[in-house]
């Protein structure tokens, strides 16, 4: 199997997305979760066909093509068979989270999040009317895990929901099935609910099994909503399509109660691209995972040679590396130092909440040469030789 090749810098710097417009041209942008790879050929083809036909209007929310493609993919990849009839479209996973929580909790209810975690979670909960309740991940020095006892205590104290990040961004934790089963029992015992953000699930690395939350138990299906999308796996964030997925009549009823505009705001190109990706893009995705896993190994080797003080544990999913830079003495937010002195743009660790001080997140969906150059720049900055 060959790895997907990143586009050359001369092509990438013609892009107008956030990743390529935020920083000066001499900075390596390795922060926001966008890929440097070309689009999967089936996606490119369907979008070109739509442009040629002038097919740039509103979505038809009754179109089940993307939902059916996702369900077929889920059955093949994860041995999970959700029903297309229990899926509703919307713009992105953040909207799935907010609109689900708005209907599952009362104003002011506590919603458990598990930092360090995707920074918008801290804002999406209050947008939905809830109150953030932090139950940080456990870290035994070798691996991270959910603090199930802590979640149990938070729900016992009155929290009404868990916003699950699965796989977990930024650490790349894929929650094991037995952990998810126990979580479903805890949540059910307290009469609470779960919204499971599974946007990075198709990017689970080989040798690791991803288990959808709604597949683990009848309890999970009764109290859970899954947020699914092809936007991270196929680099479609700007095309605006995601899915609410229900696994029970109760939660399907919740989806039916959503205003029509929640689905109408879906991007037509996103819907077309999502269908093409899940239906025909799996060979491209496998090649892309090869490139990502190769870059993870390369980063590990480069750090060992040039920056051995930096801590890095290989994730089990995503193209994101969670780096412990605290030994470099670069303060609570080493990403600021990396940008100013190394010309490497990383995501700020403290933005991910508890446990993020001294850390930064690096995007490895790029060319191997970019990984090498980034570590070289960080090593020079660590030695007191600024990039600029």
Image (cartoon, grey):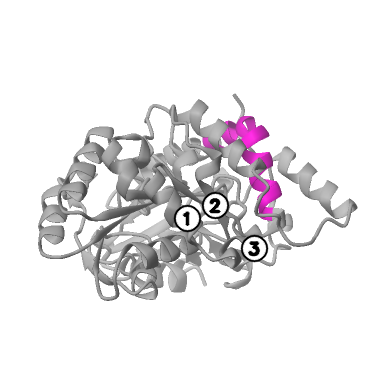
Q: Residue at x 71, y 48 (%)?
A: 272
Dots 2, 3 in contact, CB < 8 A: no
Q: Which SS does the magenta portion mostly show?
A: helix
| Label 3 residue SS | helix
Magenta stretch containing residue 271, yes or no? yes
Pick the residue in front: 112 or 323. 112
CA gap between label 2 and label 3 equals: 10 Å
- Image quadrant assignment for residue 151: bottom left
Give the foreground label among 1 and 3. 1
- Image quadrant assignment for residue 15: bottom right
Pick the residue in front: 349 or 317. 317
Instruction: Tell me the quadrant of the picture where the N terminus can be found.
Output: top right
The magenta span reads: 270-289
Q: Position of residue 334 (x, y in %)?
A: 34, 68
Q: Position of residue 176 (x, y in %)?
A: 27, 35
Q: Residue at x 54, y 52 (%)?
A: 88
Q: Which residue is mark 1?
A: 255
Q: Position of residue 110 (x, y in %)?
A: 23, 68
Dots 1, 3 in contact, CB < 8 A: no
Q: Which residue is mark 3?
A: 264
Dots 1, 2 in contact, CB < 8 A: yes
The answer to whether any part of residue 290 appears in the image is no
């Amino acid at each position: 199997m060959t790895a997907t090749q990143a586009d050359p810098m001369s092509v990438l710097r013609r892009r107008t997305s956030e990743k390529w417009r935020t920083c000066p041209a001499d900075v390596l942008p390795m922060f926001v979760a966008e890929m440097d790879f070309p689009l999967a050929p089936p996606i490119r083809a369907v979008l070109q066909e739509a442009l040629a036909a002038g097919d740039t209007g509103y979505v038809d929310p009754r179109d089940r093509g993307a939902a059916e493609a996702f369900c077929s993919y889920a059955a093949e990849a994860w041995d999970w068979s959700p029903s297309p009839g229990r899926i509703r479209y919307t713009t992105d996973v953040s909207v799935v989270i907010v609109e689900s929580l708005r209907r599952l909790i009362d104003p002011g209810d506590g919603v458990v999040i598990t930092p360090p975690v995707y920074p918008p979670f801290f804002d999406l909960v209050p947008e939905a009317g809830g109150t953030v309740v932090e139950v940080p991940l456990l870290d035994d020095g070798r691996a991270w895990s959910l603090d199930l006892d802590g979640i149990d205590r938070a729900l016992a104290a009155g929290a009404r929901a868990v916003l699950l990040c699965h796989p977990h961004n930024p650490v790349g934790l894929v929650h094991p099935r037995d952990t998810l089963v126990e979580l479903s029992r805890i949540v059910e015992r307290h009469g609470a609910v779960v919204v499971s953000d599974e946007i990075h699930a198709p990017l689970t690395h080989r040798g690791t099994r991803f288990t959808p939350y709604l597949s683990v138990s009848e309890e999970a299906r009764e109290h859970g909503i899954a947020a699914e999308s092809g936007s991270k796996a196929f680099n479609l964030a700007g095309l605006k399509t995601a899915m609410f997925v229900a696994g029970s009549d109760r939660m399907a009823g919740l989806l039916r109660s959503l205003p029509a505009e929640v689905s109408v705001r879906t991007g037509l190109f996103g819907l077309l691209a999502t269908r093409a990706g899940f239906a025909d893009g799996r060979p491209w995705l496998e090649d892309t995972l090869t490139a990502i896993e190769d870059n993870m190994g390369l980063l590990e080797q480069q750090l060992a040679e040039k920056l051995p003080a930096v801590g890095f544990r290989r994730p089990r999913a995503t193209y994101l590396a969670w780096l412990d830079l605290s030994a470099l003495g670069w303060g609570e937010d080493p990403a600021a130092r990396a940008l100013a002195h190394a010309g490497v743009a990383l995501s700020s660790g403290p933005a991910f909440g508890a446990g993020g001080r001294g850390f930064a997140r690096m995007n490895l969906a790029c060319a191997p040469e970019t990984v090498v150059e980034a570590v070289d720049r960080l090593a020079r900055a660590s030695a007191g030789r600024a990039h600029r």
